Image: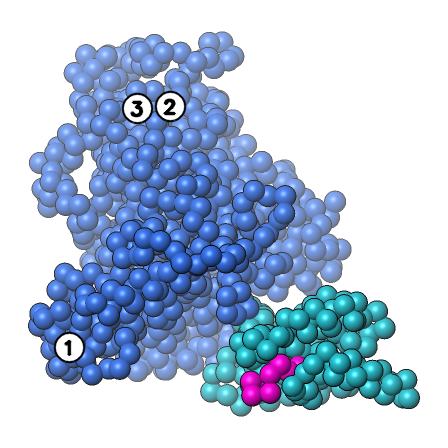
């Protein structure tokens, strides 16, 4: 994740967006890819950067905003170092996802959509992540954690905390 | 054209062209399939599932609004499976719908209510909590303002996307979007951008539930208490058909009355929300007469007697030539005819005009050309629009929908030539920027190319755009040259017109000169047109010299409109007697000896003529005429009676009958068809090309002077729209646009208050800095009478030079 000023797309992002703009017969088709570019630079969808991207693409900002709001994988504000996404769709729900979320909220001391004060964890409820056979499950950053139980979640979180402490 | 397709719907055979949707084919058989999201004018999305039907050999039910017909299709719209599906769809739609119909504006005219009544389940099996979008915990209703006028209640929304499609496909804007997903899907705008495009009111009218609401109508009355008067909008010359909905003398709203030939069911926000001009608080309901220095209210008869005594004297002494009358291009055809008849035949004066906002009136040769070439509906078939000195999106919004349609669906090209940039929603257009007054020069550049002549080097233009126009014209595309408001006050109107006529011939184009005011065409043809010798400017001069001593003003407000405000004020004060028929006590009325309250739509009935020459009937809001206010013919008719000439007219129908008898080709006026009738007003002979002699371009006087231009907005057009609280809430503030380089030189920053002045007069407005205008030019937008722009204009020249200084 390259570091840049807030609300300002990096040179690389701009180059990539302009490449995408030319790559599709309809500029609208590139919207999702542009969201990925913004997400890759910031780790979330930065409003100002997004409006800069919309200008570059010569498309209305609302087209980007509505697409971003559809996908839970594009958070609209900064997330923790470890972004926990708990699946809440049918299979996971039936296997107790709601209780797991409640437990996580209590354990981390934050609500859904919030970040812990040390910036380490953030919590989100998301729709199906395609791992119904191993429900309930969650995704932390790019990794899946499946067949979850309360104790397993606590050990996963402890493991991550230790990892951070040891640099 | 491919062969028609035959299919069976509910056991009946029907033959339709390929591409027809099942729902449309069913309509031909008189079978109505219930729908929410379907609208034949918008792109199908198949979102609501209400229109599910069974097609034999297809495993699942299909959305009939999104499925084109196929040969030998067998469709069932009423079998058990379909009926059960409809019930199911409605049950799902109602799961999160709040059922607050008793307090919902849409109650009584709600498709969801009606279709639930017709097809829905009687009871709900859903016991869980409904999803509620709480906008403000302190508010009783979950209403969220999207903009100054449009309010959204997301709980009621059933996600048909009609509003989003109206905004995107029709207006071509991108204000609304669909956010989130699943049960939380909701319509919204971006928080920082207020939703107020020129067609926003249509989203409210066509919302199939009470999710979108108008601030001006919300919680004010129940729909079934409203009576409807069929009417025609008179805030622009398109003449959109509408219903004025009223109760107990108060107008509550304007709704479209679909006329496929004219508006196709759309209304712009100016026409829709301008209804409260009618019930403005300071509307004039009593005549006034001058006693000493003050104007005092009086009875109708008293005012009529004062005026008729004065006129009797004039007639007896044969001094008719000392009387003049000016009307307004917003009067009805009947009023125009009555004024002409009264002053021509009774008073015997030739001094009659209606162009009270132009120092240089449109001459008879040109006035015969004003109007649309062809019908409004033909616009969507043109492939190249050369729009010069016009901003049709502001001047004729609903007709411009067809230009937008041609551009967005048929890839037509819209090329705007003008001294400041225009837009056509988000649709792609080309702006060819020219110096002020260079419209004729730019057109000559194109014509010279088409004739393979060398271009003069008077102005530099965007070569790429010129090449494109040349190429398109050579390919034989359907070119349409459209001129508008800026044509009428152009500094070189003759040159501009000659250049348009030349290009029209070379490109085999259509040429339309569209008037900005509602009944310009009708009023000028039915009698109020004064040729150049009897123009309002000449009338003013004759008042100044003492030749004219009595002036009648009908519906216009020259003090706020006519160039050189001070001269107009001083001149009108010299009159012996000024009679003003006005809806408000405006500055012109304040000078009068007698003021009569003017009837406005829908106080009275009559006809208007729109840009295509269609004469359309509008009706009063009740059969009993409003006694306190009268149209011009009502007042003149009674005056005629009092000066012993016998009352001439009691009803607008009598005037139409009279016109039908007297004017050739007008017999149909006696029996007006409900959708109006087209009368070819435009003279084809006048379209012959003429030599093009262009004047040299106006130059700025010195480095600090600006050439000032004037632009209106969709929501605000002058002293009349200023009376509408609705429109003023939506409209932006007045501003002067100047180029960044000029601003830097004169030390002006964005949003700074500036004085704009000529040698004597000045006004104060806010500066906006933009590259959309040329260097050395300034554009005054949204001018209000509080800072009257006509102060700065001159009667001698169409060019207004000003200086701009920061305060």
Q: Quadrant of the N terminus of chain B?
A: bottom left
**Furthest-right residue in view?**
A166
Q: Nearer the viewer's eye, disc 3 or disc 2?
A: 3
The residue to which callout 1 is attached is B74
Q: Is residue B677 above or below residue A121?
A: above
Above-or-below relation of B651 to B273: above
Label 1 vs label 2: CA separation?
A: 64 Å
Q: Closer to the observer: label 1 or label 3?
A: 1
Q: Residue, x 48% and y 32% (percent of image)?
A: B559
* Residue A136 shown in magenta: yes
Rendered-image quadrant of the C terminus of chain B: top right
Which callout, 1 or 3, points at the residue further toward the start of the chain?
1
Whether residue B801 is visible = no
In the rendered structure, which segment of residues is drawn in magenta? Answer: A130-138
Q: Which residue is mark 3?
A: B626
Q: Position of residue B482 (x, y in %)?
A: 35, 62
Same-subunit check for callouts 1 and 2: yes
């Amino acid at each position: 994740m390259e570091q840049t000023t807030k609300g300002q797309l990096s040179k690389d992002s701009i180059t990539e967006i302009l490449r995408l703009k030319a790559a599709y017969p309809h500029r609208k088709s590139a919207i999702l890819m542009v969201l990925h570019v913004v997400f890759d630079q910031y780790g979330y969808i930065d409003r100002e950067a997004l409006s800069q991207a919309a200008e570059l693409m010569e498309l209305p900002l609302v087209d980007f905003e509505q697409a971003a709001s559809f996908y839970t994988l594009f958070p609209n504000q900064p997330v923790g170092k470890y972004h926990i996404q708990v699946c809440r769709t049918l299979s996971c729900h039936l296997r107790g996802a709601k209780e797991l979320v409640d437990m996580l909220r209590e354990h981390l001391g934050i609500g859904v959509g919030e970040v812990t004060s040390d910036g380490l964890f953030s919590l989100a409820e998301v729709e199906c992540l395609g791992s119904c056979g191993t429900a309930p499950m969650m995704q932390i950053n790019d990794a899946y954690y499946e067949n979850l139980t309360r104790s397993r979640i606590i050990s996963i979180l402890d493991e991550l905390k230790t990892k951070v402490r040891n640099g | 054209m491919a062969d028609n397709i035959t299919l069976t719907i509910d056991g009946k055979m029907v033959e339709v062209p390929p591409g027809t949707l099942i729902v449309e084919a069913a309509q031909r058989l008189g079978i109505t399939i219930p729908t929410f999201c379907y609208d034949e004018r918008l792109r199908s999305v198949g979102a609501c599932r209400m229109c599910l039907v069974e097609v034999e050999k297809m495993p699942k039910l299909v959305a009939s609004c999104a499925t084109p017909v196929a040969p030998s299709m067998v469709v069932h719209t009423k079998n058990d499976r379909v009926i059960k599906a409809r019930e199911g769809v409605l049950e799902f739609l109602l799961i999160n719908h709040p059922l607050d119909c008793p307090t919902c504006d849409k109650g009584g005219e709600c498709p969801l209510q009606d279709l639930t009544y017709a097809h829905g389940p009687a009871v709900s099996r859903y016991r869980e909590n409904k999803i509620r979008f709480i906008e403000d915990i302190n508010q009783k209703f979950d209403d969220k303002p999207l903009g100054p006028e449009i309010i959204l209640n997301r709980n009621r929304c059933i996600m048909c996307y009609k509003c989003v499609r109206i905004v995107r496909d029709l207006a071509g804007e991108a204000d609304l979007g669909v956010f989130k997903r699943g049960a939380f899907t909701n319509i919204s705008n971006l928080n920082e951008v207020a939703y107020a495009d020129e067609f926003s009111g249509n989203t409210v009218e066509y919302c199939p539930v009470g999710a979108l609401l108008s601030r001006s109508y919300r919680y004010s009355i129940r729909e079934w208490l409203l009576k409807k008067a069929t009417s025609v909008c008179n805030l622009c010359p398109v003449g959109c058909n509408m219903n004025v909905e009223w109760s107990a003398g108060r107008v509550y709203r304007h709704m479209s009355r679909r006329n496929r030939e004219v508006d196709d069911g759309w209304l712009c926000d100016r026409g829709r929300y301008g209804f409260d001009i009618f019930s403005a608080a300071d509307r004039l309901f009593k005549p006034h007469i001058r006693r000493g220095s003050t104007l005092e209210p009086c009875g109708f008869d008293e005012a009529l007697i004062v005026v008729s005594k004065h006129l009797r004297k004039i007639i007896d002494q044969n001094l008719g030539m000392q009387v003049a009358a000016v009307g307004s291009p917003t009067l009805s055809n009947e009023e125009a005819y009555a004024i002409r008849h009264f002053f021509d035949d009774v008073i015997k004066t030739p001094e009659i005009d209606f162009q009270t906002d132009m120092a240089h009136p449109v001459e008879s040769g040109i006035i015969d050309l004003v109007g649309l070439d062809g019908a409004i509906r033909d616009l969507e078939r043109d492939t190249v629009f050369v729009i010069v000195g016009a901003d049709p999106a502001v001047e004729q919004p609903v007709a411009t929908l067809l230009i937008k349609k041609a551009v967005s669906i048929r890839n037509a090209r819209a090329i705007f030539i003008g001294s400041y940039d225009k837009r056509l929603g988000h649709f792609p257009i080309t702006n060819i920027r020219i110096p002020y007054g260079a419209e004729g020069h730019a057109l000559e550049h194109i014509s010279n190319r088409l004739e393979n002549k060398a271009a003069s080097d008077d102005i530099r233009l965007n070569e790429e755009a010129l090449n494109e126009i040349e190429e398109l014209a050579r390919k034989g595309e359907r070119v349409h040259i459209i001129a508008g408001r800026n044509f009428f006050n152009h500094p070189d109107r003759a040159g501009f017109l000659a250049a348009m006529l030349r290009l029209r011939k070379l490109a085999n184009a259509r040429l339309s000169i569209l008037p900005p005011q509602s009944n310009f065409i009708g009023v000028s043809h039915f009698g109020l047109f004064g040729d150049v010798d009897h123009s309002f400017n000449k009338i003013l001069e004759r008042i100044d010299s003492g030749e004219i001593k009595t002036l009648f003003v009908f519906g216009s407000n020259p003090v706020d409109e006519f160039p050189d405000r001070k001269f107009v004020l001083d001149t009108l004060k010299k009159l012996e007697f000024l009679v003003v028929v006005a809806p408000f006590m405006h500055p012109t009325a304040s000078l009068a000896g007698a003021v009569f309250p003017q009837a406005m739509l829908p106080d009275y009935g009559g006809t208007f003529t729109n840009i295509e020459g269609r004469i359309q009937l509008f009706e009063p809001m009740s059969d009993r005429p409003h006694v306190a206010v009268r149209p011009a013919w009502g007042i003149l008719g009674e005056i005629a009676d009092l000066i012993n000439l016998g009352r001439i007219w009691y009803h607008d129908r009598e005037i139409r009958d009279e016109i039908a008898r007297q004017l050739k080709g007008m017999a149909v006026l006696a029996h007006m068809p409900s959708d109006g009738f087209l009368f070819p007003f435009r003279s084809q002979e006048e379209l012959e090309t003429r030599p093009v002699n262009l004047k040299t371009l106006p130059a700025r006087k010195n480095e600090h002077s600006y050439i000032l231009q004037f632009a209106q907005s969709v929501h605000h057009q002058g002293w009349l729209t200023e009376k509408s609280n609705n429109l003023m809430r939506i409209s932006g503030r007045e501003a002067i646009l100047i180029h960044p380089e000029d601003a830097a030189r004169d030390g002006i920053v964005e949003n700074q208050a500036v004085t704009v002045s000529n040698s004597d007069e000045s006004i104060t407005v806010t500066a906006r800095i933009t590259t959309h205008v040329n260097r050395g030019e300034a554009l005054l937008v949204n001018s209000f009478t509080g800072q009257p722009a006509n102060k700065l204009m001159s009667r001698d020249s169409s060019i207004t030079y000003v200086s701009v200084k920061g305060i």
